[in-house]
Image (spheres, helix red, strand yellow):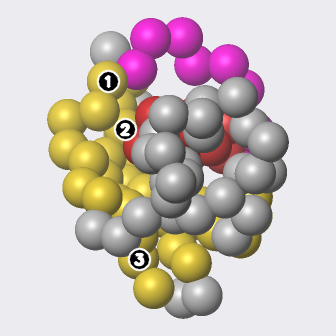
Amino acid sequence: MQFAVPPDHPSLPGHFPGRPVVPGVVVLERVMEAIEAGHGPLGAMRLPQVKFVQPLLPGETAEVVLEGEGPRWRFRVLRDGATIASGEVALA
């Protein structure tokens, strides 16, 4: 699933002033949306492991890549083929 966070997204003011960066929680929202798009509503989930290695800037296109099937998924978020975030999502 590809996504871009528009420059007028309500989470961006103050994160960070003068050089906005997409908050990690917004990136993780897109990961959850990708999982639910393929598997339907899942209810409570946990994130036993998440690593952010590069920032995502407003307007940049990123892609969520999922591996595995419920109750556990590994994910990577890529920008231009490079990993910017990775981790694991599990049903609670």
Look at label 1 and name its amino acid: Arg
State which quarter of the image contains the N terminus: bottom right
Residue at image location 70% in from the left, 28% down from the top: 10
Q: Which residues are magenta?
A: 36-45
- Name the mark nearer the viewer: 3 or 1: 3
Q: CA distance from mark 3 to mark 2?
A: 17 Å
Query: Considering only order in the chain, which callout, 2 or 1, is on the residue closer to the N terminus?
Result: 1
Depth check, mark 3 against mark 2: the one in front is: 3
Q: Which residue is mark 1?
A: 46
**Residue 71 shows in the view:** yes
Q: Amino acid at mark 3?
A: Thr
Q: Position of residue 29 (x, y in %)?
A: 57, 35
Tell me the element at label 3.
strand
Say which of 53 and 31 sits in front: 53
User: Which residue is depicted at the point 32% across and 24% down?
Assistant: 46
Sort mark 2 into few (<14), some (14-19) or many (20+) by Cα contacts within 10 Å. many
Using the image, determine if residue 36 lies above or below residue 67: above
